[in-house]
């Protein structure tokens, strides 16, 4: 220990006698440590950090495949999803989602955000609970229901609403519509992409001014779909279920 103290004292005296050289050494060390920290943070964020979902290895994406056109893959229609819920034996919490651009207004300057409409099952399949409030109730995603509800990201809650403890029940004004906030998701949860606002799928149909959008269509296959493999069912069993036609195509999320 005494040798270490002597070494430190000698090093400090040497640096004090040569301030120019000392500055170069300190800057070089700072740049090296900063670069290593930045690289590690990037690798951790992309490769090492676990997905913020419950049992992410049991999440799958469901797609439709056109067999007459050499396996062209598309999204799903809401009618497809309703059929798969009835027919499949391997998956639970099948849910569809579609993302739109929107601007949040009020409580400050307008701010662009990603807003995702989704049906019951999409958030539930991820197994992540809000830190404040709740997710949507089944009756809030039904035609004629109280559909203009919103769950917001932790980022939006902090930066737009100043982490207000009374956020539940407050209005969220967007260029698409005005919603009543029912929940705040945990830090880092932004599925899909960098979503800041989640609303029931039915809210899109309720606010549409075009009659063609009021009814579900079989060939409206633009929705992304996620689901969870049932407890006790292996991935291989889910693949067999898919190949039997109960689910048209599954991929890991």
Image: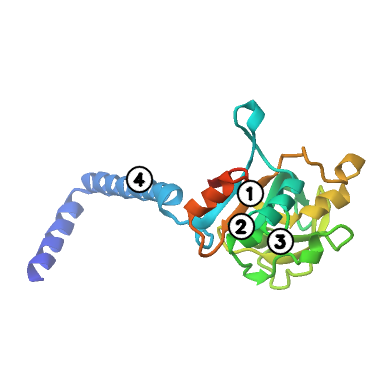
Q: CA distance from mark 3 to mark 4?
A: 37 Å
Is 54 or 73 nearer to us in this picture? Answer: 73
| Mark 2 or 3, nearer chain start | 2
Query: What crowding class fits label 2: few (fewer than 14 Cα within 10 Å), some (14-19), or many (20 or more)?
Result: some
Quarter holding residue 228 = bottom right
| Mark 1 or 4, nearer chain start | 4
Determine whether the residue tagged by mark 3 lies in a helix, strand or loop: strand
Q: CA distance from mark 1 to mark 3?
A: 32 Å
In the picture, the disc for residue 151 is 3
Q: CA distance from mark 1 to mark 2?
A: 8 Å
In the picture, the disc for residue 89 is 2
Q: Position of residue 150 (x, y in %)?
A: 75, 60
Q: CA distance from mark 2 to mark 4?
A: 50 Å
Q: CA distance from mark 1 to mark 4?
A: 51 Å
Q: Position of residue 116 (x, y in %)?
A: 70, 50
| Mark 2 or 4, nearer chain start | 4
Verify CB contact (< 8 Å) between mark 3 and mark 4.
no
Is 43 or 107 nearer to us in this picture? Answer: 43
Q: Residue at x 52, y 59 (%)?
A: 52
Looking at the image, is mark 2 or mark 4 nearer the viewer?
Answer: 2
Determine whether the residue tagged by mark 1 lies in a helix, strand or loop: loop
């Amino acid at each position: 220990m005494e040798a270490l103290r002597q070494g430190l004292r000698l090093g400090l005296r040497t640096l004090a006698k040569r301030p120019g050289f000392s500055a170069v050494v300190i800057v070089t060390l700072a740049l090296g440590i900063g670069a290593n920290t930045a690289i590690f943070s990037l690798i951790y964020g992309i490769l090492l950090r676990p997905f913020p979902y419950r049992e992410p290895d049991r999440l799958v994406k469901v797609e439709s495949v056109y067999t007459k056109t050499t396996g062209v893959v598309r999204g799903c229609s809401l009618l497809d999803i309703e059929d798969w819920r009835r027919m499949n034996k391997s998956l639970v919490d099948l849910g569809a989602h579609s993302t739109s651009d929107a601007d949040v207004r009020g409580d400050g300057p307008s701010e662009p955000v990603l807003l995702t409409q989704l049906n019951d099952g999409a958030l539930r399949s991820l197994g992540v609970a809000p830190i404040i409030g709740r997710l949507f109730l089944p009756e809030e995603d039904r035609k004629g229901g109280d559909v203009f509800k919103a769950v917001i990201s932790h980022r939006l809650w902090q930066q737009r609403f100043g982490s207000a403890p009374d956020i539940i029940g407050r209005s969220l004004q967007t260029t698409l519509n005005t919603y009543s906030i029912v929940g705040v998701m945990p830090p880092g949860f932004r599925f899909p992409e960098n979503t800041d606002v989640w609303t029931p799928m039915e809210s899109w149909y309720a606010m549409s001014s075009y009659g063609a959008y009021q009814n579900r269509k079989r060939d409206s296959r633009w929705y992304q779909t996620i689901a969870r493999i049932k407890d006790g069912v292996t991935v291989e069993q889910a693949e067999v279920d898919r190949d039997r036609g109960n689910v048209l195509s599954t991929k890991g999320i």
